[in-house]
Amino acid sequence: MAVDVTQVATVDTEPGTLPAQMTAWVIRPEREGEPLDAFQLEEIEVPEPAAFEVIVRVMAAGVNYNNVWAALGKPISVMKYGDHPEYGHHIGGSDASGVVWKVGPGVTRWKVGDEVVIHCNQASYEDPEVHGLDPMAAPSQRIWGYETTWGSFAQFTKVQAQQLLPKPTNLTWEEAASYGLTYFTAWRMLMTRCNLQAGQKVLIWGAAGGLGVFAVQICKAAGAECVGVVNSDEKGELVKQLGAKGFINRNEFAGMMRRGGETPEEEKARFKESRRFGNAVSEILGGAPDIVFEHVGAATFPTSVLTVKPFGKVVICAGTTGFNLDFDVRYLWMKQKEIVGSHFANAYECLKANELIESGAIRPVLWRTLGFDGVAEAHQLMKDNKHAGKISILVGAEKEGLGKTAEGPGAIYAEVG
């Protein structure tokens, strides 16, 4: 049945009352594969909020690579865990801005009509880790819109009340939907896991990418100095605009990248290039970095361990070039360095990070906004590496530029990545 996406910005019920059906981009197990095929428009029953849950009318949604994986069904199908077996379908989208439309029993902090952004961490209220350790340690911890269904690529989404944050009034709907997953991840990596301090030195891989643009701004806000690794001088200038002391074009040090399976001679040459890279980092920062911000993985990790100063930290949240890491561990134990794992953020971290967006001290970096009909296309662009930065999707917002209700700096529009 054909679905009319031209009416997706129209809702026939008043706040507090849900329609029976909604338009959504849906992935089902039988069509996992290329995003253009896996994502299909369907009319889906609108869920009701349970205790401590909220239904949000989505005004705009953010696109992340996690739902490229959901489309492909790799490395494992999302349909096999979380709440997917219950529903049999997946609605992706782990970033959103919107309006509270209906609240479930027990919700007292939020009311119908509140304008919000949504962070993507969910955990069961009953897990003791939520109440004294960290929700990220809870056995039930899941990423909403990836490990759960009811994500943001639909007219309405269902979330836990603790996922809601005030929408920054200085941002449009599409700007407010663009930053949560990457920014809050970078915040936890640096502020919580590494206890970033003023005066420290930080090396940031992929500094013009979705994580890196926020890592650079966090360093600036904290009074730390950073150098960013980028793949072009143009992106290096953006990184300097965001607050980096300098940048390194990685194409000038291509030989430092670990490919795997190097011969002893090739490894000796690679190590020499890594040393040269480390010297370049120290020259810009005035010394070796206290922290290396890692998410590239296999290709860069040996250089990260080598480059960070004695007693320094390599903090990692991803492995985009591979997750089987091969490095010379002598430089870890002999210099007493630390490897720190990090994954997204808890609600309090998201709240504190969001306050800097509200104040304008940190700004989203957005490349392009597409209409609701562009969800499958956006993920295909990502999968084929044809995008140049963060993409937002208009859902309830009829056009770009809506939702800003106060003066203040909005997003930076740039090609990044």
Image (cartoon, helix red, strand yellow):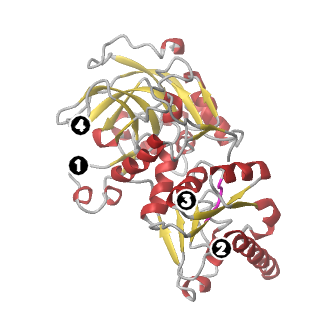
Residue at left offset 73%, top offset 53%: 236
**Is residue 97 placed above or below 188 in the rendered structure?**
above
Where disc 4 sits, the SS reads loop
Type of amino acid at the residue the image marks with label 3: Cys
Q: Is residue 118 visible?
A: yes
Q: How far across and how far down the image is residue 49, in percent?
A: 26, 30
Mark-to-mark CA distance, 3 and 1: 33 Å
Badge 4: few (under 14), some or many (20 or more) residues near its Cα, within 10 Å? Answer: few
**Is 209 included in the stretch rendered in magenta?**
no
Q: Which residue is mark 2?
A: 302
Type of amino acid at the residue the image marks with label 4: Arg
Q: Where are the magenta residues, as a range?
A: 203-207
The disc at residue 219 is 3
**In the orientation shown, which residue stands out farthest toward the bottom?**
334
Which callout, 3 or 1, points at the residue further toward the start of the chain? Answer: 1
Q: How far across and how far down the image is residue 328, in percent?
A: 64, 81
The answer to whether residue 262 is left or right of residue 390 is right
Type of amino acid at the residue the image marks with label 2: Pro
Q: Is residue 77 visible?
A: no
Which callout, 4 or 3, points at the residue further toward the start of the chain? Answer: 4
Residue at left offset 35%, top offset 34%: 87
Type of amino acid at the residue the image marks with label 1: Tyr
Q: Which residue is mark 4?
A: 109
Which callout, 2 or 1, points at the residue further toward the start of the chain? Answer: 1
Mark-to-mark CA distance, 4 and 3: 32 Å
Q: How far across and how far down the image is residue 13, in percent?
A: 32, 12
Q: Which residue is mark 1?
A: 125
Mark-to-mark CA distance, 2 and 4: 47 Å
The disc at residue 404 is none
> Which of the two residues, 66 or 305, is positioned nearer the viewer here?
305
